[in-house]
């Protein structure tokens, strides 16, 4: 059965309203009947460094731990690739049958400027 976990710094810093939103999203998406990895969008934003922040619920429905060592992630909107970047995050390992929220940061040079970044989809490029 899928379980929701928060990385330690998220667990301490997350506002109650955001936690409730994430818990609700988890409850809506934890039964997606996937045998693999699925990213459910939570929020997109541009920070003060003009980086694209893509916050998602990472569902590891597989039987193996998911690491983010040299993983190429693509962010697309309606099939158009908006951002692409290699991520190496040694601290981020999502155990089997665990879902965890995470924000992936795309540097300014690794995404296309848009009026809106909503309704996008994040995926691992294999």
Image (cartoon, rainbow, N blue to C red):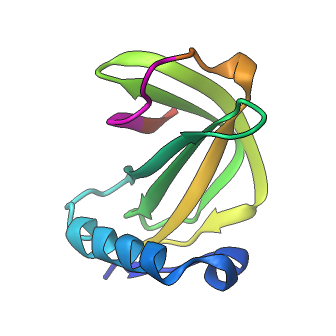
Q: Observer-nearest residue: 75 or 108?
A: 108
The answer to whether residue 106 is seen in the rendering is yes
Q: Does the magenta stretch include residue 21?
A: no
Determine the residue positioned at 31% across, 82% down. Answer: 1
Q: Does the magenta stretch include residue 120?
A: yes
Q: Percent from the top left, x then y, of residue 103? A: 60, 53
Q: Percent from the top left, x then y, of residue 87? A: 71, 40
Determine the residue positioned at 41% across, 62% down. Answer: 59
How many numbered callouts?
A: 0
In the shown orientation, is residue 24 left or right of residue 88?
A: left
The answer to whether residue 126 is seen in the rendering is no
Q: Observer-nearest residue: 51 or 62?
A: 51
Determine the residue positioned at 42% across, 27% down. Answer: 116
In the shown orientation, is residue 117 left or right of residue 48?
A: left
Q: In this view, does 37 lie above or below 59?
A: above
Q: Percent from the top left, x then y, of residue 56? A: 47, 53
Which stretch is magenta? 114-121
Q: Percent from the top left, x then y, of residue 28? A: 21, 69
Res 90 quadrant in image: bottom right
Res 97 quadrant in image: bottom left
Q: Observer-nearest residue: 96 or 29?
A: 29
Determine the residue positioned at 55% across, 78% down. Answer: 15
Q: Observer-nearest residue: 55 or 90?
A: 55
Could you tell me what secondary structure mostly forms the magenta stretch?
Answer: loop
């Amino acid at each position: 059965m899928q379980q929701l976990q928060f990385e330690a710094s998220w667990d301490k810093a997350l506002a109650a309203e955001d936690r409730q939103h994430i818990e609700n999203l988890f409850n809506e998406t934890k039964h997606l009947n996937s045998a693999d990895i699925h990213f459910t969008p939570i929020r997109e934003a541009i920070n003060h460094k003009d980086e694209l922040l893509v916050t998602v619920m990472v569902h590891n429905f597989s039987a193996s731990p998911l690491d983010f060592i040299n993983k190429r992630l693509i962010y697309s909107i309606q099939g158009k690739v908006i951002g692409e970047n290699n991520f190496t995050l040694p601290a981020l390992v999502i155990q089997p049958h665990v879902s965890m929220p995470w924000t992936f940061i795309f540097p300014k040079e690794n995404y296309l400027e848009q009026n809106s970044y909503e309704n996008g989809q994040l995926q691992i490029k294999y």
